[in-house]
Amino acid sequence: MRQHHIVLLPGDGIGPEITSITKRLLEKVSGQFNFKLSFEEQKIGGSAIESGGTPLPEATLESCKRSDAVLLAAIGAPVYDTLPREQRPETGLLALREGLNLYANLRPVKIRKSLIEASTLKSDVIKEVDLIVVRELTSGIYFGKPKGRIEGADGERAFNTMSYSSKEIDCIAKLAFDLARERKLKVCSVDKANVLDVSQLWRERVELMSKDYSDINLSHLYIDNAAMQLVRSPGEFDVILTGNLFGDILSDEAAMLTGSIGMLPSASLSSNGPGLFEPVHGSAPDLAGQNKANPMAMILSAAMMLRIGLNESPAADALEQAVENVLDSGYRTVDLMCEGCTELSCSEIGNRILNSF
């Protein structure tokens, strides 16, 4: 029997609630498809700060490195916002990405017919949306050096450095082109090449990479135009390729096309180690402990883990279909509620999904 070891990182806020439900679903689906999952729970973010004073304990990172895949719920809370930058939950997440060499973040955005009315955009604008944002994750302005704050003649000055090497651009571009071959053969590369030297190199390397993918239709957009077109005509996009900063912005914008950020999963991938799978939403501390959270993005992240991280595609299909079945039956969490539907709690909708396959 195939065996996979999973590290669970419940984190903060609603994280423990949605992790508990997702673990039960994974245990059931693994039994149905004849493979075994073992689970190890570790701390990250605020929960790690509370127990040990650091947002990413060494034990957590080492456990993640030894795993077959990592499933993270959410981190952060307002109580930690006043801490020094190096002690905040978000710093722990960045350190985890760097420690696992997670160079690529994938965020699929697909409109479900059962939720089309939940979007703030008109249905005829979003009905054909099925895209994926491919974001470079371990370089760019979030990791570039020098960075810091200094005192000068004009007062304090803060600075960050946006930097990419040819090798880093080539790695993320290849992934995007390979993904496009499994989809609609379209890549839109987003940069700011009219202003930034780093974006000029980005565009040159992507153009060079495209010569090995003559079957792929490559286009380029500046970040400001891309943000506009993503709202104006999102159905035109297939694979969106971009750097760390622009990808951070565009992936959140794309997430809201669906009407609820609580429905969207993501995957962060390494070239030769375990991937990190997590919902796009945050820790929602205002909902923590109230049994109101939407667990479906976490469940769909688990499905991405099964498919991409563990090569268990039939089980991933079953898990995704179970979510679809519950939505088609008119059941909703509070964030998705609309006329004619039945509102369920976090645990109730988890049980509905559990019993639908």
Image: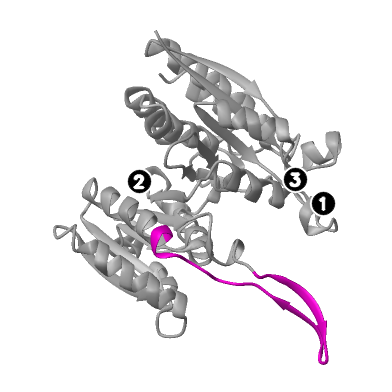
Do the residues under discs 2 and 3 have CB atoms within 8 angstroms? Answer: no
Do the residues under discs 3 and 1 have CB atoms within 8 angstroms? Answer: no
Whole-number angstrom distance, CA of label 2 to CA of label 3: 30 Å
| Residue 278 can be seen, yes or no | yes
Q: Secondary structure at mark 1?
A: helix
Q: Secondary structure at mark 2?
A: helix
**Which quarter of the rendering shows the C terminus?**
top left
What's the magenta region? 146-168
Mark 3 packing: few (<14 Cα in 10 Å), some, or many (20+)? Answer: some
Mark 2 packing: few (<14 Cα in 10 Å), some, or many (20+)? Answer: few
Q: Residue furthest bottom?
A: 153
> Counting residues from the N terminus, which is met first, the one under dot 2 or under dot 3?
2
Instruction: Report the residue at 32% width, 73% height from top.
Output: 204
Whole-number angstrom distance, CA of label 2 to CA of label 1: 39 Å
Which residue has dot 2 on it? 113
Front residue of 356/23: it is 23
Which residue has dot 3 on it? 285
Mark 1 packing: few (<14 Cα in 10 Å), some, or many (20+)? Answer: some
**Residue type (three-letter) at the residue carrying disc 2:** Lys
Instruction: Report the residue at 74% width, 48% height from top.
Output: 89
Q: Position of residue 175 (x, y in %)?
A: 33, 50
Q: Position of residue 292 (x, y in %)?
A: 67, 37
Query: Residue 80 got which mark?
Result: 1
> Counting residues from the N terminus, which is met first, the one under dot 2 or under dot 1?
1
Whole-number angstrom distance, CA of label 3 to CA of label 1: 12 Å
| Residue 222 can be seen, yes or no | no
